[in-house]
Amino acid sequence: MANSFTRLISGRNAAVVLASLGAGTMATGFLLSENVSLAAEARTKLYPPSSDFPDLRKHSNCMAAALTPAIYAKLRDKLTPNNWTLDQSIQTGVDNPGHPFIKTVGCVAGDEESYEVFAELLDPIIKDRHNGYDPKTMKHPTDLDASKITNGVFDENYVLSSRVRTGRSIRGLSLPPACSRAERREVERVVVTALAGLKGDLAGRYYSLGDMTDKEQQQLIDDHFLFDKPVSPLLTCAFMARDWPDARGIWHNNEKTFLIWVNEEDHTRVISMEKGGNMKRVFERFCSGLKKVEHLIQERGWEFMWNERLGYILTCPSNLGTGLRAGVHVRLPKLSKDPRFSKMLDNLRLQKRGTGGVDTAATGDTFDISNNDRLGKSEVELVQMLVDGVNHLIECEKKLERGQDIKVPAPITQFRK
Amino acid sequence: MGGETLLGTIGIFVSTPDSNSPQIRQQGSAMPFGNTHNKAKMNYDSDQEYPDLSKHNNHMAKILTPAMYERLRSKETPSGFTLDDIIQTGIDNPGHPFIMTVGCVAGDEETYEVFKELLDPVIEDRHGGYKPSDKHKTDIDPANLKGGDDLDPDYVLSSRVRTGRSVRGFCLPPHCSRGERRAVEKLSIEALASLTGDLNGKYYALKNMTDAEQQQLIDDHFLFDKPVSPLLLASGMGRDWPDARGIWHNDNKTFLVWVNEEDHLRVISMQKGGNMKEVFNRFCTGLTKIETLFKERNHAFMWNEHLGYVLTCPSNLGTGLRAGVHVKLPNMSKNAKFEDVLKKLRLQKRGTGGVDTAAVGGVFDISNADRLGFSEVELVQMVVDGVKLLVDMEKKLEKGQSIDDIMPAQK
């Protein structure tokens, strides 16, 4: 051990390094001595946290708003048990200054422990992003009992399709920004083995991205199932595209109503979807599928990352809690042109997107309407809010068709104390 | 603070206020992944970590066997750069059946030593058989260049020489922290600010420039932008853009330095017309002055007698020099012997937009193909002599004459 140390710090290399750093002969003498802590300390003095603090003056994301020089100084030299650092967490936010209108999160977790080790930065970001949810004092409710949903079948003259998605991470393995190839392959192995145990309407097949035939690829594209190598710099700057397409793939059931993405932006993304308006059935399959998969991995000694502060742990802080986005493609030709539409959505805690998903424009009068919230409310609560909200929007559309007036609903309260 | 334990762990213990277990901050840098992350990977077998290179066609993929991966994966340079850091760009960019990319980068000067087992064969493959025992000649004395001041300006539209330099003691662009990158910038600004006379100039930091300055730099063809090539981005070079990046040029706009783009410094001398001798003079004078100014501030350039000047990409070792012209060769370029002539002259062609662009209007960018194993003077001599011959051939073809009697021998 002494030898490896002296190999590192003594010799020509060190002398050159030190000479380059302008260190005088006295300091050089100290640094060449076999005193480890002084050498590491010297490096810390040469590059104190202030010299590394990122320039965030033109930035507009949650990380830039929360990261002060004091917090940076405290956290810069910390490591999670998987050796993930603060600099790696925030790289995506440093590289993507953001947009005044769209506030991105600007940081990612490399592992479950990131949320603990870097809590001083991540807790305020979570609070900012999740409407005041305070991880230090609040608990997140998990509820996957789909039988509680009422009025969950929409008028199919308006609702074209229904979908619920979330993510799940495998405890004990690093997340996509940080994972090594071996870890990523292990995630794939654990998940694919579990999925092979699904039966009945959930029986299905796995397609590895690297191995699929052209024909399989075309079919997956036609089904709108295929995901491709991330091009968004928000993701690539977070190191998520490394080693593509190694250990990435898509699993779906034979009926094409339950789909799992492996090792894209999270360990798994789980999607339940159908044409038409039967959101209740979509959510039932979602909950049942998730529970079965969880059971199958537990049989082999694995579990999902979850805790009562933050719910299900995912790569992006924006997806903590439920990680759930429940949505419909819905036609609202008259309502969407009403000037009160945006306010109505806000009050109902819903968001609109184009039918291509996030950052796309709506085609015609068809919108993707989904829940805004992820953390602080359970899955059942969020899906019920979506169901109630969409039913209300459809009622308004019908009223406008009949020439009647509509009212903007009162805003839904954020959190129960 | 027992001496034995500290020597054993090579690091300092940073205890965190809220936890019982200390977390070790390794001495090396952690960007983008580095040795801290590497320690965690050692929990898995080498086969589990070995990348899938079955569809790959780059120098790294040809050379990195599973056995070599196993031998090298536990190593790290003193600043903490590891094997996976070196090869990430080659894994993420499988390459192209016709274009052989290098597929690996250095994070610091020591990378080329610590990972010799991988990089020596890569260098040998890329640089025409250059052996680990070979010595590289450096010669930036412009007086040694013969001729070069009389390339026909009716054909040769512009002349340019570029190279790179790395500042010893700092990590290279794939690995440097923000603090290091800023330190390189600060040093560069100080050194360049001392240049005088024909080399008097100004620095434009990328993040501070006004719209007017930016437009001017674009019009002058000086501005470099954030890399978009996945070859560069996958290696971590685009991090923190545009922090500590900038462009310096002299008032005459004939000498230009890029700071912290793909290398610490890229140095470019250029002017319209065919006076390559003048371009090379300024290049050598400028480089020598800059080197002196850095040395006065206790910083040498990275250089050794085996690899010459050390740069981020193994393809740029040695001289890192590309000397080239934009030259009109409408007839020659359509001639069946064009490729063969270029090969014999040790030259390569590119479009006028640079690498990976097409030629427009019969105008080609012709430059030296080699970087390592020949000195700067030798390479520029090859360009000067070669371009002269190409222009003579062009003139002959214009007159309908044959070029067979002036075909060159293999250099």
Image (cartoon, coloured by chain):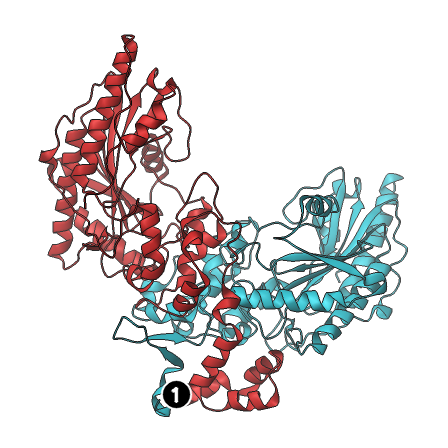
Q: Residue at x 45, y 56 (%)?
A: A91
- Amino acid at pointer 1: Leu
Taking the image as shown, residue A324 lies to the left or right of residue B167, namely: left
Residue B305, quarter of picture: bottom right
- Residue closest to the far top: A402
Name the foreground residue: A408 vs A248.
A408
Q: Residue at x 40, y 22 (%)?
A: A363
Q: Residue at x 39, y 25 (%)?
A: A362
Q: Is residue A15 above or below residue B25?
A: below
To which chain does the residue with label 1 belong? B
Could you tell me which quadrant the N terminus of chain B lies in? bottom left
Could you tell me which quadrant the C terminus of chain B lies in? bottom right
Q: Is residue B188 above or below residue A235?
A: below
Q: Is residue A407 above or below residue A225?
A: above
Name the foreground residue: B371 vs A44.
A44
- Image coords of residue A127 (percent x, y): 31, 50
Name the foreground residue: B285 vs B252.
B252
- Image coords of residue B352 (percent x, y): 72, 45
The residue that disc 1 covers is: B7
Specify the chain shown as red.
A
Taking the image as shown, residue A218 lies to the left or right of residue B224, namely: left
- Residue closest to the far left: A147
Taking the image as shown, residue B197 lies to the left or right of residue A92, namely: right
Residue B192, quarter of picture: bottom right
- Image coords of residue B328 (percent x, y): 80, 43
Q: Is residue B372 above or below residue B211?
A: below
Specify the chain shown as cyan.
B
Q: Is residue B268 visible?
A: yes
Q: Secondary structure at mark 1?
A: helix
- Image coords of residue A306 (percent x, y): 20, 54
Q: Is residue B128 visible?
A: no
